[in-house]
Amino acid sequence: MRSRASNSRRSVLYAVLLAFVIIVVWEKFSDAEANVVREAGAAENLYRLSQGLGDFSGPDLRRAVASYLKAAMADDWPAMDRGTVRAGGPAKQALDAIYRMLSVVNDQRNRAVVAEIFSQLDRIPKRADRD
């Protein structure tokens, strides 16, 4: 009898631990999905807001956003999947290039658009926050 009770307790404990593991894995998956949706939405908004910068800076911002997205998908996402996120990878460099470009085009004429672009950039999750 004692052996059956002991085995039963172990089985229940194992089932509870397994349930916790499944919940943790599901939450990580949900967090990753939410980050991707947030990042894609911010990138879409950046692309649209770039129209407000005019013919000189708008196309440059669109190219910079495209470079960032390509780098994120080609380098950062696979690295995150492997659990080896690099702090200064190509996506970080592309994001830094966007910030540098915006600091140059931030003049009185387009200050409101640039402020909203910076707001959208802040919605893009930092790689260190994703692991």
Image: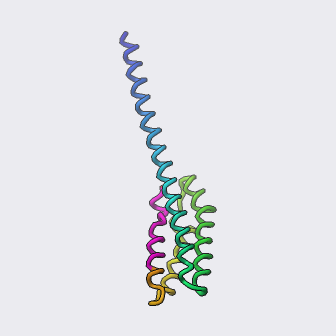
Q: Position of residue 77 (x, y in %)?
A: 58, 58
Q: Give yes or no for residue 118 being in the magenta stretch.
A: yes
Q: Is residue 122 left or right of residue 51?
A: left
> Would you identify the image quadrant in which residue 129 lies?
bottom left
> Would you identify the image quadrant in which residue 70 lies?
bottom right
Residue situated in front as seen by the camera: 40 or 52: 52
Circle count: 0
Q: What residue is shown at x 51% (from left), y 67% (from top)? A: 42
Q: Position of residue 103 (x, y in %)?
A: 48, 84
Q: Is residue 50 left or right of residue 108?
A: right
Eyeballing the image, is 23 above or below 115? above
Eyeballing the image, is 10 above or below 78? above
Eyeballing the image, is 3 above or below 72? above
Eyeballing the image, is 56 above or below 27? below
Our reading of the magenta stretch's main secondary structure is: helix
Most extreme residue toward the top is 1
Q: What residue is shown at x 44% (from left), y 90% (from top)? A: 108
Q: What residue is shown at x 52% (from left), y 53% (from top)? A: 33
Q: Is residue 3 left or right of residue 86?
A: left
Which portion, as a residue range, is magenta? 115-130
Q: Quarter of the image for the N terminus: give it.
A: top left
Q: What residue is shown at x 39% (from left), y 28% (from top)? A: 13
Q: How is the image coloured?
A: rainbow
Q: Position of residue 36 (x, y in %)?
A: 53, 58
Q: Give yes or no for residue 17 being in the magenta stretch.
A: no
